[in-house]
Amino acid sequence: MGKIDPAQFPKLLTVGEVAARSGVAVSALHFYEAKGLIESHRSRGNQRRYPREVLRRVSIIKVAQRVGIPLAEVQAALQSLPQGRTPTASDWKALSELWKDDLDARIKRLQGLRDQLDSCIGCGCLSLDSCPLRNPWDQLSEEGAGPRLLDPGE
């Protein structure tokens, strides 16, 4: 098999090509662009054209969303990357380091929640003395809104 000539690939991709290659809907690409996560250029006919490196950026966005990283954090991280080139493995390593502590904390909270829910799922009564969800007479209302017993980290 011969060497691939990069010149045989168009430098810019249409929004449809990016959608097909990335598995992301065209509407999502427009949304990402409106939020400043990706950039396009306009053709003479005022059609969006994306540089090829947008495919890697869209992949990073999808991975980050899958693990629950807010788009504002994704945007800040993407802005730290050099423009005009495809993000590299070392770029991804730097981004993942930014998110690692937060993801570890989320995992710990989710494991605690899972472990607390195990005893209640079987009976469903939510009124046992040992139930971590029990809140007789709405005593926790004075502490504020939300599931206080389930998220002790906040």
Image (cartoon, rainbow, N blue to C red):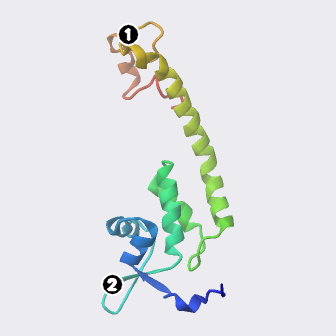
Q: Position of residue 149 (x, y in %)?
A: 46, 22
The span from disc 2 to disc 1 (Cα, nearest Å) is 60 Å
Residue to which mark 1 is pinned: 127
Q: Relative to 124, say whether 49 is above or below.
A: below
Q: Amino acid at mark 2?
A: Gln
Helix, strand or loop for disc 2: loop
Q: Residue 140, labelled with which disc? A: none
Say which residue appears at 55% left-offset and 39% top-offset. 106
User: What crowding class fits label 2: few (fewer than 14 Cα within 10 Å), some (14-19), or many (20 or more)?
Assistant: few
Q: Relative to 7, say whether 28 is above or below.
A: above
Q: Relative to 136, say whether 85 is above or below.
A: below
Say which residue appears at 54% left-offset and 67% top-offset. 79
Left or right side of 153 for 124: left
Say which residue appears at 58% left-offset and 33% top-offset. 108
Q: Position of residue 95 (x, y in %)?
A: 61, 59
Helix, strand or loop for disc 1: loop
Residue to which mark 2 is pinned: 47
